[in-house]
Image (cartoon, coloured by chain):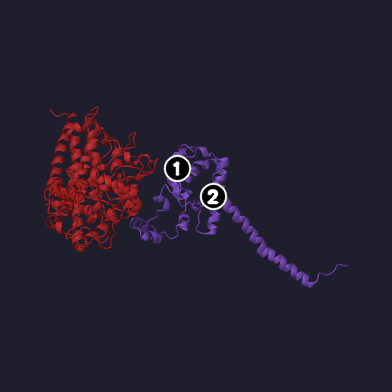
Amino acid sequence: MNVKKIPKWLLILLIVIVGFIALFVLPFFSWLIADEGLNRTAHADFCAQCHSMEPFWAAYQQDIHGGSSKYGFQASCTNCHLDNSSSVAYFTTKATKGLHDLLVENFGDPDNIDWEAMRESREEYTYDSGCLSCHNNLLSATQSNSKAFLPHKEYFSGETDKKCVSCHEHVGHKNMSDYIKNPNAAY
Amino acid sequence: MISRNKWIILILLGLLIVGSLTACTSEYATNPTTQEQAAEPAPTAVPASPKTIVVEMNRNAGNLAVNEKLTITRGLDEVSQECIECHKAETPGIVNDWRESRHGHVSVSCLDCHAVEKNDPTATQHEDLEGTDTYISVLVPPSRCANCHPNEAEEFDSSGHYRAALQVEAKDGMQTLMLVHEGQNHPEFSNVTQETGCMQCHGMRIELDDQNGPTPSTWPNAGIGTIYPDGSVGNCSVCHTRHKFDIAEARKPAACASCHLGPDHPDIEIFENSKHGQIYATEGESWTWDSAPDAWEPGDYRAPTCATCHMAGIGELSTTHNVSDRLYWNLWGKRSAMRDSNDPMSALTGHGEEGRAKMEMVCESCHTPRHTEAFFRQGDGAVQLYNESYYDPAKKMLDELKEKSLLKENPWADEFQILYYHLWHHEGRRARQGAMMGGPDWAHWHGFFELQQDLYRMQDIYNYRMETGQIEEP
């Protein structure tokens, strides 16, 4: 055998380079791609590509949370409709809810869903963790507002099982029932 | 020339001064007249100065519009400010109530309760709102109260009160009684006995007209079990009347008495007949009625009212809006049984043994355990005597007559069936409820005395029908 032995210094250099790529570069790019992917599929323009989401998109556009305010701030679909309590929870709900929606949209019968009736179970597909990740100072903010103090006191002290959307039942989508009846309703 | 002009100017100035003085004086002269006219609805007002009149007028729920502007900017949105500005003249009673309410103090105002989404089935707009984004409804369902008072609403939803209208709606016998017998099948007015009677305590399923407003055959009603278009059930303003929503009002017996009275459940009369009622009537005016929830305790009062025993956070107990929570028996059904159900639609909603334990804690806030135990021994005895010596024999006779077709088809024209109804629905309840709430005259003279009379008469009719095979006596 006449194979030239690789010098020891080169071997170490190679290990360092490969190790650096494996430990930092690849994870960085995979994080970048994943984050970009998650972000691009978080907003209304992505979600509304599905036909069945049109009424909710239209009603969302009219709502303060859809950017219809003088401040122009817009919450994304996933801010409210995914569990924002941790990255793991976010990813888990993203995967399960996303897969569910993908299946129903393509193989189910979304046109025959009674969306109006589904509003009754709104607490199952909106997450307080989402509300509170933007309204993160709500406890102290409501303490100085006598009108908001009482209901939020019961919420934050755990005296009630109600969730944000139990009381704020129309938040996020303005006049949604109109759009459910007629997705093309113009205002 | 110059001096002549000067004189003309001086004369003109003089006229101007005299003119303004005259105008001022006449204004002063006419002002009190206006105020006197304004003060007419309030004869007690002494118009010493305009300020005094304003105060007196407000106290008498007069027309706020005749006074200075009622401008409230503290914590109110602009639309609610506009509501108040008009409604102080249109419906001064409502605005006056609200001003004095706790809601008014914490800036909970018109739209917080009356605003609805545009496409809500109850959404309406009166003239001044047309073209705006604000939609309102005269109907405020308990689900809206629950936004700020979630626990009170949840407790109510587990209570017997929840069932008040739903059970009337579900019972064919009740519907026949109201429409066919009391309403006499009248083509136009058969429903009025329901509208003016039943639904004013029990409540009604609210129906909407084509303008999204409630129909006159279902509203206004002050029924505790009102079923609102959004499906929520209840009516908080029955005990905390609008628009003051007062905790003190609901703690007084009058809040319950507008329904819990009369021949079939004379609960206010029983209370008045009791020693608790005696003390309340003697000195209730001087008691403290507005202590914080859960902090209204003996010392604030010398005797309990309905709310004290059935709802208040007395001693270690917590306040509850579930009025079935501290009960052992069902005392209004045909035959009394221990409560044992989680279903508010069940006549036995509640948990008897836990309920009794809680009620004993209430009693023992003032009485000794010996006193409490002996009181319940007496009351429980009365309930069981009614069950075994009155209801059971009456039911047995009814069943036998039914089996032999010896009952009239129309129960309301059949003396035996009328007596049977009175036995459980009137006299039987008076005996049981009178005994369990310390009202001796109701337990005895209006209760057991009448019961034995009912039973003997029923036995006579039963014997005649069984012996002759005839319904009608000659």
Q: Which residue is mark 1?
A: A176
- The colour applied to the residues of chain B in this rendering is red
Residue, far front: B1
Q: Amino acid at mark 2?
A: His
Q: Is residue B129 visible?
A: yes
Q: Is residue B385 visible?
A: no
User: Which element carries disc 1, helix, strand or loop?
Assistant: helix
Q: Position of residue A138 (x, y in %)?
A: 41, 59
Which residue is found at the position 57% from the left and 50% from the top? A41
Q: Nearer the viewer, residue A119 or B177?
A: A119
Residue at the right extreme of this rendering? A2
Q: Position of residue B448 (x, y in %)?
A: 15, 46
Q: Is residue B278 left or right of residue B132?
A: left
Quote the CA–CA distance across marks 2 and 1. 18 Å
Q: Which mark is residue A80?
A: none
Q: Residues within 10 Å of mark 2 (few under 14, many from 20)?
A: some
Q: Chain of mark 2?
A: A
Per the image, the residue denoted by label 2 is: A43
Which of the two residues, B320 or A146, is positioned nearer the viewer here?
Answer: A146
Position above or below: A8 against A96: below
Q: Colour of chain A?
A: purple
Tell if the residue under mark 2 belongs to the same chain as the one under mark 1.
yes
Q: Nearer the viewer, residue B273 or A53?
A: A53
Residue A174 lies left or right of residue B160; in this view the side is: right
Instruction: Tell me the amino acid under the disc marked 1.
Output: Met
